[in-house]
Amino acid sequence: MLPFESPPATPIARAAPAGRGLGCWPALLPAVALALDAAWPLPSPTSGPGLLWLDLAAVVCLAWAIAGRGRARRTEWNTPVDGPVLAGMVLAVLHVVRMGGDLEPVQWLRQITASGVCFYSLSARLRREPRAPDAIWPAFALVVLALSVFVLAAATHGAPALQQAIRGVDERWVSRSGLAKALLLGTILCAGRAAESGARALWRVTALVGAVAFVLCTFVGGSGLGIASLASLDEPFYFGTSVVAMLFLASLARMAWALSRDRADEAWRWRAAAVAFPVIAALLIFGGTTGGEGLRTIAGLAGAAVVASRIAPRAARVAPATVPAAAPAAAPAQRAEQPPRTAEPPASAAA
């Protein structure tokens, strides 16, 4: 099957209500873990990397996908981007070996693994759910609101306090200007959701707050982008990682754009996703592989939404019940003009 070839849609009768209400709380766990790792990380040992909230979220998402009545089947774990994902994992492992187990490559490998587990778990479990996008999109709003509150709270103490907060997040996420990059991506995705007809005002407020927080982070801490990053393409690891990431993001962007035509009611959110993936590519090219936990987690969630929605059946619209129309009553004037009926004589009298 070609990477962009859509398999037959799952019959609507098989759809499970996993994306409704609290039924898809695991989709929110990576977003919660991302915010906790930024502001309230778990205690780390004196030597070696400590446990991340994202690690715990990945374990719970995997358990949710393989257990329960609506668990994913063995044949539902494949995706059109398995090749780039596997190549990226191999490159990350080789980088750890080459660097002799340095802390930074090990943290990158852990982030890639955890976000990859969330990506596969959510895309496998939700691909039979007609409302798969509605199950994952609130996670982007949660990321934007949590990080924006963190940024605005730090900004109330002045620019030095905000700079210190940005540096602290970069240390915990192993990133460079990771807070601004995560806010940019989350704001784009929330703005697409806010542009849909019938969207609640909370989506517009979320996109506006995220944009303000992103501008503050960029103004105070910089964007982490520069032409000098292009010189890193001479390094084999960086070049290979960039090629694999471009293939992965190009596939997702193309699928998202196709979904904007196939699912017309959700067109704006898929257009936003089709824009977000090239933005991630630009951040990688001009900012290096330093997006950190924020960039990788949001990319994994958006990828899961795209993969699950391209296979999920369309939600059936409930048509109003049709009531057979009663025969219209005769108008009073018409009833007056009709001659009165005379009782027919019985058959014995006629004889």
Image (tube, rainbow, N blue to C red):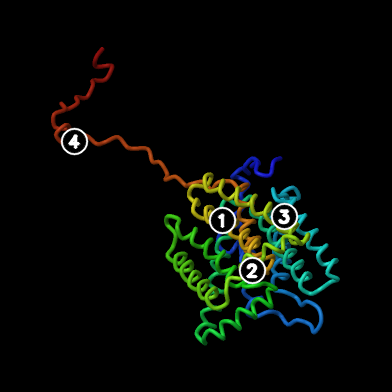
> In 3D space, how far apart are the residues under numbered discs 4 and 3 (Cα atoms)?
77 Å
Q: State the residue lying farthest toward the bottom.
A: 157
Helix, strand or loop at label 4? It is loop
Residue hosting label 1: 273
| Label whose residue precedes the other's in the sequence (3 or 2) | 3
Q: Are the residues flagged by discs 4 and 1 in contact, CB closer than 8 Å?
A: no
Residue 318 is left or right of residue 91, and the answer is left
| Label whose residue precedes the other's in the sequence (2 or 4) | 2
Name which residue type carries label 2: Gly
Camera-side mark, 1 or 3: 3
Q: Quadrant of residue 205?
A: bottom left
> In 3D space, how far apart are the residues under numbered discs 1 and 3 (Cα atoms)?
19 Å
Please tell me which residue is depicted at 71% across the width and 54% down the height of the picture.
243
Residue hosting label 4: 331
Residue 302 is left or right of residue 97, and the answer is left
Is residue 76 depicted above or below 329 in this figure?
below
